[in-house]
């Protein structure tokens, strides 16, 4: 009788549909993992990378991870907090950003202090109740699944609480946003709270961190006189330190450095002003920092 000595697969939950689904698959594909081609597939084995993917309702992902049924998941921060699951944020992923706010008929809710005694309709009961408890406000929270904007018009609620991207949907429903942002949400990678790190998670983390860095940085190359190197390096310090190599042309060097993608065009202008020439920007597809 022989025992199975094959390594355990890391089990990862991904959104099966919705705004997070495509972006979640893209970041994993960029990190070198297989992803499904048929949106009807519910599971996918990637034995070469030691993982198995499960495509689930975004709202259920935190529950599966929190229960220990699955090791890792990608979901929204709002869905994680709303679930009350024993799961925690491991890596913010930078996509699927949205704001969670209250809205009401214009002039009917001067400030969020006036929420006391109101009927609040939302699909995110956990998030709203947590906010009300934190602020010491007593109000009735009504759970609705989607399309909460019409609940005020139908007389079901006085106020709604929902994810807001542009605010146009609220305006179309004749509502105005009230008060400060309750929650800033984005896609996050989650693991189980107070549990040992899953086997294989460090490799996944390094790969995802590498993709996020590659998306945030570009590689900049330029030539400059050696007398201006210190000034140029101050503008492009890189992650650790830039690479500076002598050129065949006497008195000139080539510099290579990773620089933030945001502001890179202005940086090219600044380098040109101090004498840099042959300035090139190239994308970084993956990295380990």
Image (cartoon, rainbow, N blue to C red):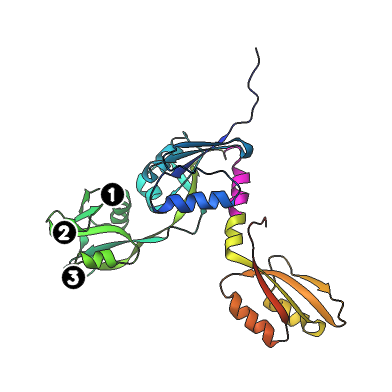
**Category of crowding for the residue at label 3, using alpha-carbon neighbours closer than 10 angstroms: few (below 14), some (14–19), many (at least 20):** few
Q: Quadrant of residue 48?
A: top right
| Residue named by callout 2 | 152
Tell me, yes or no, if residue 117 can be seen here: no
Tell me the tag on residue 187.
Answer: none
Q: Residue at x 85, y 83 (%)?
A: 251
CA separation in Å, label 1 and label 2: 17 Å
Report the predominant secondary structure element of the magenta stretch.
helix
**Category of crowding for the residue at label 1, using alpha-carbon neighbours closer than 10 angstroms: few (below 14), some (14–19), many (at least 20):** many
| Residue named by callout 1 | 125
Tell me the tag on residue 106.
Answer: 3
Image check: 42 left or right of 101? right
Q: Quadrant of residue 67?
A: top left
Q: Quick one: quadrant of the N terminus?
A: top right
- For this orientation, the residue located farthest to the left is 155
CA separation in Å, label 3 and label 1: 23 Å
Which label lies toward us, 1 or 2? 2
Q: Is residue 159 above or below residue 82?
A: below
Q: Position of residue 4 (x, y in %)?
A: 63, 22
Front-lying residue, 203 or 255? 255
CA separation in Å, label 2 and label 3: 12 Å
Label pair 2/3, CB-CB below 8 angstroms = no
Q: Position of residue 198 (x, y in %)?
A: 57, 38
Label pair 1/2, CB-CB below 8 angstroms = no
Give the mark, 3 or 1, whose residue is nearer the N terminus: 3
Residue stretch in magenta: 198-209
């Amino acid at each position: 009788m022989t025992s199975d000595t094959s390594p355990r697969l890391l089990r990862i939950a991904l959104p099966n549909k919705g705004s997070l689904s495509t972006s979640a698959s893209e970041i994993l594909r960029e990190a070198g993992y297989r992803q499904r081609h048929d949106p009807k597939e519910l599971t996918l084995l990637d034995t070469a990378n030691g993982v198995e993917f499960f495509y689930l309702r975004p709202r259920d992902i935190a529950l599966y991870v929190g229960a220990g049924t699955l090791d890792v998941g990608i979901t929204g921060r709002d869905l994680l907090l709303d679930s009350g699951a024993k799961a925690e944020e491991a890596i913010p992923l930078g996509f699927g950003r949205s704001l969670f706010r209250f809205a009401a008929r214009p002039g009917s809710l001067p400030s969020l202090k006036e929420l006391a005694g109101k009927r609040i309709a939302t699909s995110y009961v956990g998030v709203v109740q947590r906010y009300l408890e934190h602020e010491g406000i007593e109000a009735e929270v009504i759970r609705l699944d989607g399309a909460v904007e019409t609940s005020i018009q139908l007389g079901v609620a006085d106020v709604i609480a929902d994810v807001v991207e542009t605010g146009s949907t609220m305006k179309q429903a004749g509502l105005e946003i009230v008060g400060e942002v309750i929650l800033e949400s984005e896609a996050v990678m989650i693991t189980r709270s107070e549990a040992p790190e899953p086997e294989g998670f460090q490799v996944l983390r390094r790969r995802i961190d590498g993709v996020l860095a590659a998306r945030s940085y570009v590689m900049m190359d330029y030539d400059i006189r050696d007398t201006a190197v210190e000034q140029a390096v101050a503008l492009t310090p890189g992650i650790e330190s830039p690479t500076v190599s002598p050129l065949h042309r006497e008195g000139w060097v080539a510099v290579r450095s990773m620089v933030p993608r945001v502001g890179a065009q202005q940086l090219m202008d600044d380098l040109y002003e101090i004498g840099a020439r042959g300035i090139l920007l190239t994308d970084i597809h993956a990295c380990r920092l």
